[in-house]
Image (cartoon, rainbow, N blue to C red):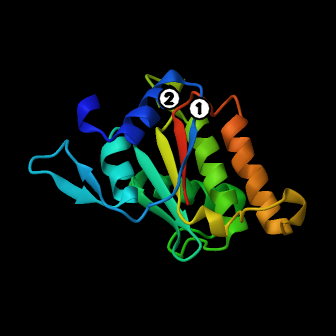
Amino acid sequence: MPDLLPAWAQEMREVFKGGTVSQFLIHGNVFDLVSDRTSDPIRFLSVRDYLTEVMFARFEVVLAYNRGTGVRAVKGKDEFQKFLKLSDEWMQTSYTGNPLPRDPLVAFDLMDRFVRYSHHRTVIQDGVPTLSPIKTAVILEFVQFMVPAGEASHLGDGSTEILIRLLDWASDPNLVGSQAVGVLLA
């Protein structure tokens, strides 16, 4: 399949498989269509759809977020709904059956909890608790509006908190090399 992927996608796949990086920034012409040469006939997809359907085809859950549409499970809706029900029961939230957050701080908190839950999920197999991580990808669209370019000291509190969360996701040894990946589109 390497010859079927664009150069940037092949490099991303190799780096992720190496287990040293779990967060990627794709910038520039993110509104261009990407040719999916893995399908017959060739089809053209948005970058988000290409990531979801081709790059993260083996992932169980793919979340997408931007400030306009909020958090969405673009793949693995049932698994994400199970998490939301658990969150409602344990954290006294009310996500099930309600619109998911658009506010960046609330959305990042929810996505962070899901990523960490996915990494530590345990299931009962033959009566024994067994670690069973969920392969999860998070696609953050229009990230330039969440963390604008500039000096960190000039960012507002909300952008600073989001930047810290992104840096934490990129450097947390529990997430780097795990079953979780983040992609920032700008």
Horizontal side of residue 75 vs 90, given as left or right: left
Q: Position of residue 45 (x, y in %)?
A: 28, 59
For the point 50% across and 58% down, which residue is it? 28
Quarter-of-image position of residue 8: top left
In the current view of this chain or complex, which residue is farthest to the right?
Answer: 153
Question: What is the C-alpha distance between the residues marked 2 and 1?
Answer: 6 Å
**Camera-nearest residue between 5 and 135:** 5
Horizontal side of residue 119 vs 78, given as left or right: right
| Residue at mark 2 | 15
The answer to whether one can see residue 43 in this image is yes
Q: Position of residue 64 (x, y in %)?
A: 49, 60
Above or below 28: residue 129 = above
Q: How many marks?
A: 2
Quarter of the image that includes the C terminus: bottom right
In the current view of this chain or complex, which residue is farthest to the left?
Answer: 41
**Camera-nearest residue between 63 and 94:** 63
Q: Position of residue 127 (x, y in %)?
A: 48, 24
| Residue at mark 1 | 21
Type of the residue with mark 2: Val
Type of the residue with mark 1: Val
The answer to whether one can see residue 93 in this image is no
Q: Earlier in the sequence, mark 2 or mark 1?
A: 2
Q: Secondary structure at mark 2?
A: helix
